[in-house]
Amino acid sequence: MAMRRLLRYGGIAALCTAAGFASGLRPAPPEADVKMESKACFTRVNIWYEKQDAIPSTNYHSGEILPAATPVKILAVGKKKIRFAVEGKGEFTIDHMTEHSPVELTELFEQYFSESDPVAPDGKFHSFTKEEQRHIVNGTLAAGMGREAVLMAYGYPPSHKTPKLEAETWKYWIGKWRSHDITFDKDGKLKSF
């Protein structure tokens, strides 16, 4: 069921300002003069939320999951908020918590959204192993997953504690006061979580 939910968005064409994974794991921000509002995009990663109108960019892993590859319409990109709509679910708002995610809003936007459909035949999803794909669909982790598969499954770790994605250890939060570390081996494969 979860795989069908993820794959049902496979063939939808869309335009968006965010480009695919460019170089490295953190994509380059879009051109400053490109307007992001009123664009159709896809979620690049799984997004956890407890309240649709207040999703902290701290990326707490609690509540429901809006799956990677969900088609969205960007409604507004403000100084500290990204508002978007999902058909049948209504509006969502990501709050840019700059104390925990000290990145430009354009970079934050690219962490969440993409112009290309991740589950299209040539999409990022198909570059992962079947096991990694299963964990992405379920929003879970398993030993041996690569960094990019972890990003799609779990989203980006807040950059105030994980400033470099090449680091051996990433720190995620389950809630406001509970965090957990995940560790990669020298080959960039998930070792402990």
Image: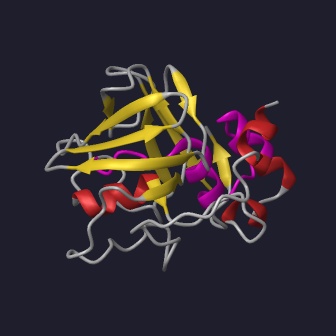
Is 131 in the magenta? no
Residue 156 visible, this angle: no
Is 156 in the magenta? yes
Q: At 54% across and 49% down in the image, what residue appears?
A: 45
Is 71 situated left or right of 1 in this image? left
Residue at the extreme left: 79
Is 133 situated left or right of 188 in this image? right
26 vs 149: above or below: below
Is 158 situated left or right of 113 in this image? left
Q: At 78% across and 63% down in the image, what residue appears?
A: 126
27 vs 184: above or below: below
The image quarter in which residue 30 lies = bottom left
Q: At 67% across and 39% down in the image, what residue appears?
A: 141
In the rendered image, residue 73, in percent from the top left (x then y), is placed at 43, 49
Q: How is the image coloured?
A: secondary structure
The mark total stands at 0
Segment colored magenta: 134-160
**From the image, which quarter does the N terminus lie in?**
top right
In the rendered image, residue 100, in percent from the top left (x then y), is placed at 24, 42
In the rendered image, residue 12, in percent from the top left (x then y), is placed at 66, 58
Q: Nearer the viewer, residue 71 or 25?
A: 71
Is 154 situated left or right of 103 in this image? right
Residue 157 visible, this angle: yes
125 vs 157: above or below: below
Q: Nearer the viewer, residue 56 or 115?
A: 115
In the rendered image, residue 15, in percent from the top left (x then y), is placed at 48, 67
The image quarter in which residue 84 lies = top left
**From the image, which quarter does the C terminus lie in?**
top right
Residue at the extreme right: 130
Q: At 58% across and 66% down in the image, what residue appears?
A: 116
Q: Nearer the viewer, residue 158 or 121?
A: 121
